[in-house]
Image: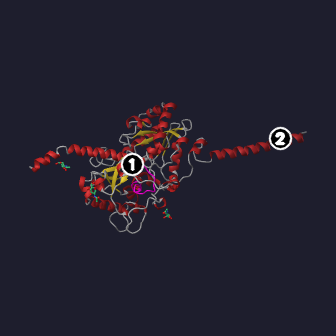
Amino acid sequence: MPEKRVFSSRLLSCLIAISMFFLILSCSLLFRIGDNAFVPRSIYKLIVVDQSIESRSNPCNDLCSESKQLKPVASCDPDQAVLKVFMYDLPPEFHFGLLGWTGKPNQIWPNVGNFSEIPKYPGGLNLQHSIEYWLTLDLLSSLTTSVPRSCTAVLVHNSSQADIVFVPFFSSLSYNRHSKVEGTGEKSTNDILQERLVEYLNGQDEWKRFGGKDHLIMAHHPNSMLIARWKLGSAMFVLADFGRYSDQIANIDKDVIAPYRHVVRTIDASNSPSFEQRPILVYFQGAIYRKDGGVIRQELYYLLKDEKDVHFTFGSAGGGGIRKASTGMAASKFCLNIAGDTPSSNRLFDAIVSHCVPVIISDEIELPYEDVLDYSKFSIFVPASDACKKGYLMNLLRGIKREKWTEMWENLKQIAPHFEYEYPSRPGDAVDMIWKMVSRKVSTLHYKARRKNRYNMSLQFLNSR
Ligand SMILES: *[C@@H]1O[C@H](CO)[C@@H](O)[C@H](O)[C@H]1NC(C)=O
Ligand SMILES: *[C@@H]1O[C@H](CO)[C@@H](O)[C@H](O)[C@H]1NC(C)=O
Ligand SMILES: *[C@@H]1O[C@H](CO)[C@@H](O)[C@H](O)[C@H]1NC(C)=O
């Protein structure tokens, strides 16, 4: 009898041990991925796991295999295009040469009709300012018949038929990669290229025609074109914000604000975590101590760091920072965009593609396409002076309940494609939106010029008498 009991209790403990083993195994599988173990597994499933930044800087995304099989498309009819663009044939060292590309002798542009011949843009944080790359590729592809694209902007060979003259200088890359003085030289490649660009433009008939007013120059990195901006200020710039410009050189009347290229992964709209699936209420990850406008980050940090369901930490792009931000934003309801050392940052666009409702605390920020896009439908603006009041921000955000939040989230899912830079470009993506914005600025330019010239005709007759 006792023997039997011993046997059955052994059997029991054995069973318990086996089931414990399976329990631990399944738990560890469940929580293996990521470091925020309290985030439900379902959220991780929604995020495509390992897609490195490097591979995403390759323009050949999932569209490529599709377009390779496509039959040649009809080329765009310039008369149907929203914007006719004349582009200078600047030597490659100003653009694709900065990416290490070398063509055949006398070849200025890569063959963009063959995806595997397109040079890749460097990954990581360089990508934020890669606007120059996407716009140039898109223009080049307007001449091929092998790339299906929207015909918003089309290259023309005769500058007198163009609405705008495009200057294909990769100024952000030049700043990021070539700002250091190399060897025994006195100037950096970035400085030399800018000086040569100014000289080149001043010598062009197209520039002289309207003093550069109808020229489009890309200077998305706040420190790009530091020298040349002073001499080319009459042109239309494509910028991230006006933080480091004087009003005369850059302003909202003549210039275009383009989104940063986001660095976190885009969430598929059909799989976006909902209100309940985002356990973090407020998310911010970034440098906390910044100069200039950035002191507010520090103040907010001390206000929010002890709140529960708030994630507010130091973080950088290195050491898996981008991946952590991808996961964190996708698990958060609200994402803070606080002024740093410039009014804008890629964080806003990272929040948008994560469908995390942006909370914008940056009084000087300029927003892309704001003339056609109502940001208040999917973001919350808080004046910096209010955000620093104790309890203000948390009260505001805790007061936004499921229904209101979901409305903003639905809007975010709709507008997120406007912030994707793609090659080939598609209707409504960032490239397409930027061309349309430029076209609206060109109309303003013509309007102003005509107003100014109303009396020229009578002046001419008077003078000829
Ligand atoms: C595209 O470029 C690759 C690499 O240069 C080359 O091997 C391939 O033959 C090209 N394809 C076409 C259709 O020209
Ligand atoms: C360019 O266009 C203008 C105006 O349409 C025309 O007068 C001129 O002849 C053209 N130039 C060339 C080289 O085709
Ligand atoms: C019209 O007159 C202004 C001022 O005299 C001059 O700057 C401008 O070039 C003229 N425009 C044309 C189209 O003649």
The quadrant in which residue 184 appears is bottom left
Of callouts 1 and 2, the N-terminal one: 2
Is 59 located above or below residue 17 in the figure? below
- Where is residue 416? Give x, y as percent: 46, 43
> What residue would you read off at disc 1?
152
- Where is residue 181? Give x, y as percent: 36, 63
Report the span colored magenta. 137-152
Kindly check if marks 1 and 2 are in contact, taking CB atoms under 8 A apart as contact: no
Colour basis: secondary structure
Regarding residue 85, the answer to whether it shows in the image is: yes
Q: Amino acid at mark 2?
A: Ser
- Where is residue 306? Give x, y as percent: 50, 38
- For mark 2, give the secondary structure: helix
For residue 418, side relative to residue 207 (left or right): right
Regarding residue 301, the answer to whether it shows in the image is: no
- For mark 1, give the secondary structure: loop
The quadrant in which residue 272 appears is top right
Is 204 located above or below residue 389 in the figure? below
Q: Nearer the viewer, residue 69 or 169?
A: 69
Q: Main secondary structure of the magenta part?
A: loop
For label 2, count other residues whose C-alpha is less than 10 Å away and answer few (under 14), some (14-19) or many (20+): few
Q: Nearer the viewer, residue 170 or 301?
A: 170
Q: Amino acid at mark 1?
A: Thr
Q: Point out the image quarter for the N terminus.
A: top right
> What residue would you read off at disc 2?
9
